[in-house]
Image (tube, helix red, strand yellow):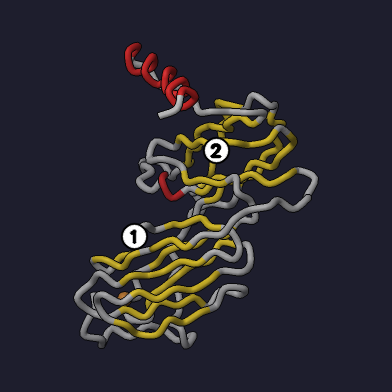
Amino acid sequence: MTHRQRNRQWPLVVAALLGCALPMPTSAQGAVSGRVSIVERPGASTKDMGNTVIYLLPADGRSLRYGTTKVPIAMTGKEFTPHVRVITPGSAVEYPNQDPFSHNIFSTAAGAAFDLGTYPNGVSRAATFRKPGAFPIYCNIHSRMSAFVVVVPTPYHTLAGNDGRWSIPGVPAGAYELHAWHERASEVVAKIDVPASGLTDLSSALDARGFVVAAHKNKFGKEYTSTGKDRY
Ligand SMILES: [Cu+2]
């Protein structure tokens, strides 16, 4: 260990002794954080807060640089896990089949259509998303399986926690649009000015009172039949 490396560890030691957490390392970029809530129908409670996507876009419409990733959405127990992924254009989502029976993952969404075919346990296939948007993902065998891949052209994105809290680190100072997306609500957008020190305690409220569950078609654009051996 060099002298320089040892010195860097001192703040960690001090933090451990004091029993406190160190702030994230920052330059001229701060964290932007807040809390989202969902307005539900009377008597209903929110159980899917963690499926809320939060992202920032420059208010002046300029393009941002971002990297690409490959992330999984597993099929397990006839469900997609996690239910929502947020990625950047050019990123891929792979769908490992962890069920003891086959699935056929597809999307017919404009700008993101794909069909991975039918494949069994232990196999994983992937599809790349090129365009921004919120794309529903389905299984052609099990009509109740659904997921969303939300593609945003910004590195400043995150999912809210189950308590609605979210934080996006390393946001350069500037004017942004703060977007909050949830599958059961219309997207909410607010203008924010982020100083170099970051911004906290932002709040967004999504309105899910108008949401109705709508049946979707299979990959052929037809109704699902209930004659399959894996039917519900
Ligand atoms: Cu399936």
> Where residue 168 is drawn, which disc sits there?
2
Q: Position of residue 78 (x, y in %)?
A: 27, 69
> Where residue 230 is drawn, which disc sits there?
none
Q: Badge 2: how crowded within 10 Å, few (<14), some, or many (20+)?
A: many
Which one is in front in this view, the residue at disc 1 or the one at disc 2? 2
User: Disc 1 marks which residue?
Assistant: 81
Instruction: Write down which quadrant ligand 1 falls in.
Output: bottom left
Q: Position of residue 165 (x, y in %)?
A: 46, 34
- Say above or below: 227 vs 129: below
- Quadrant in the picture for residue 19: top left
Residue beneath the point at 51% across and 55% down: 86
Mark 2 residue type: Ile
The quadrant the C terminus occupies is bottom left
165 on left or right of 181:
left
- Quadrant in the picture for residue 141: bottom left
Whether disc 2's CB lies below 8 Å from ligand 1 is answered: no
Q: How many marks?
A: 2
Q: Position of residue 84 (x, y in %)?
A: 44, 57
* C-alpha gap between disc 1 and disc 2: 23 Å
210 on left or right of 122:
right
Residue beneath the point at 45% across and 79% down: 217
Residue beneath the point at 78% across and 50% down: 62
Residue beneath the point at 39% across and 67% down: 146
Question: Considering the numbered disc 2 on the image, is that residue within a helix, a strand or a loop?
Answer: strand
Q: Badge 1: how crowded within 10 Å, few (<14), some, or many (20+)?
A: some
Q: Name the one closer to the observer, 13 or 174.
A: 13
- Going from the N terminus, do you reach mark 1 or mark 2 first? 1
